[in-house]
Image: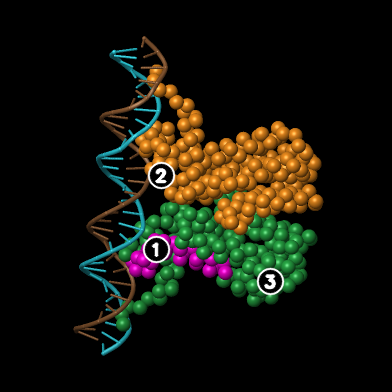
Chain colours: A orange, B green, C brown, D cyan
Amino acid sequence: MPKVVDHDQRRADLVRAVWAVIGLHGIEGATVRRVAEQAGVSMGGLRYYFDSQQGLLRFAALAVAGNVSARVRALLQSDSDAANRARLLLEAMLPVDQERRVEADVWLAFLIRSRVDDALEELRSKAWTGTRHICRLAVSLRRGVAMPETIGAELPDADLETWAQHLHMFVDGLTVQAVTYPDRLSTDDLRVAVHRQLALVADR
Amino acid sequence: MPKVVDHDQRRADLVRAVWAVIGLHGIEGATVRRVAEQAGVSMGGLRYYFDSQQGLLRFAALAVAGNVSARVRALLQSDSDAANRARLLLEAMLPVDQERRVEADVWLAFLIRSRVDDALEELRSKAWTGTRHICRLAVSLRRGVAMPETIGAELPDADLETWAQHLHMFVDGLTVQAVTYPDRLSTDDLRVAVHRQLALVADR
DNA sequence: ATCGTTATAGCACGCTTGTGCGGCATTGTT
DNA sequence: AACAATGCCGCACAAGCGTGCTATAACGAT
């Protein structure tokens, strides 16, 4: 058996290259050649790990979702007070630092593309369900009611469910603005906005 | 003088073709050939009115902004009660019917692209200013204070300005969700969400 | 009816794209 | 040292792209 490399690690590197390229040139600028160059690999080398461009981009999109998911999972096992956990949950989805802004760039690019690219449809659907679930968790924490256990289950109180819906929209809006107007919405502004929105949820 | 056609009307037709293509295939699918075919024109015929693809797309994007702007202007001269006008102002920016969903598709596609396409930078900047202004108008109407006269001027009351900011994010989030999850957010849902958010602004 | 301007068509070119494929390099095993 | 499996390279090709350009059709003025 010859030369052995860590395939998972290699794929992770290539995915990071995809993110970098999308951050610089948008999703339509994420050509095979450019990704290969960014990764310091030849076209053939890239093709060895991803048999098609669509597969590469799909994998890169799933990796973003995986990042968010991992952060949320880690957070759910922490043990600070409820208000803080609610805030951290939302911030786990948002570009609260410079590195994460690229993540958000990539995410939004894929979300918009998913409207016309069937290969991303499952991702889009799961993204909605996941985000909504996290919003429900945050509302529950802020209101001191039991957190929903199964993903997809609505909150028993219709009013709280509405708050979760509004929080979901607010989060999406924040993402759009952070990505589109990075010079108008600093990471601090973003944090403050989340804090205030959660205060609204708690007050009423 | 020979064959005379209404250039503005012709351009408007071509722009509608651009919108249709973007709605079907996304902005990266908006090739010159496809737009020409959608408009029932040859490539040369299209080129007669737009000397470059970039010019065509840019014009199509500006036309969307023009639509919104026209609706808002018309609304500001109507004379229903304040709460209604506030609601209608926000709805003028949102995809509240099926036809307008395409408009939102196109708009969001351009907004995302503006991050990496310098030709759209001015558009992006003006979009932010305009949207924020409309949000300030809506807040003013709902709170019964004087509406700002100049675009770009912050509301005198810092609390109200914060509400305008949140409304702006909410509107952007609604747009994203209406575009990305049309089957999960009906136009009625959208209207209800706007109504509720404005009620929050009024209540405090 | 003729002319001259304008509107439209469509071909051709150079370029970029994704992908197929044959070959070379690398390295653990024998 | 020799082998063979694995990792990687980079060219070749067809398809699709934006755009330049020339020819033709349409039509108001004369």
Q: Residue at x 76, y 50 (%)?
A: A199
Q: Amino acid at mark 1?
A: Ala
Q: Magenta stretch: residue A119 in it?
A: no
x and y, in percent, of residue A145 in the image: 79, 40
x and y, in percent, of residue B37 in the image: 37, 60
Q: Chain of mark 2?
A: A
x and y, in percent, of residue A50 in the image: 42, 35
Position of A46 relative to C17 (above/below) = above
State the CA–CA distance, disc 2 to disc 1.
Answer: 33 Å
Q: Amino acid at mark 2?
A: Arg
State the CA–CA distance, disc 2 to disc 3.
Answer: 47 Å
Residue matched to label 1: B39
Label 2 packing within 10 angstroms: few (<14), some (14-19), many (20+)? some
Q: Is residue C18 left or right of residue A20?
A: left
Q: Is residue A12 left or right of residue B54?
A: right
Residue matched to label 3: B148
x and y, in percent, of residue A110 in the image: 51, 46
First to last magenta residue range: B45-69
- Residue A34 shows which numbered tag? 2
Position of A36 relative to B8 (above/below) = above
State the CA–CA distance, disc 3 to disc 1.
Answer: 42 Å
Q: Chain of mark 1?
A: B
Q: Is residue B173 left or right of residue A4?
A: right
Q: Are marks 3 and 1 on the same chain?
A: yes
Q: Residue at x 49, y 63 (%)?
A: B61
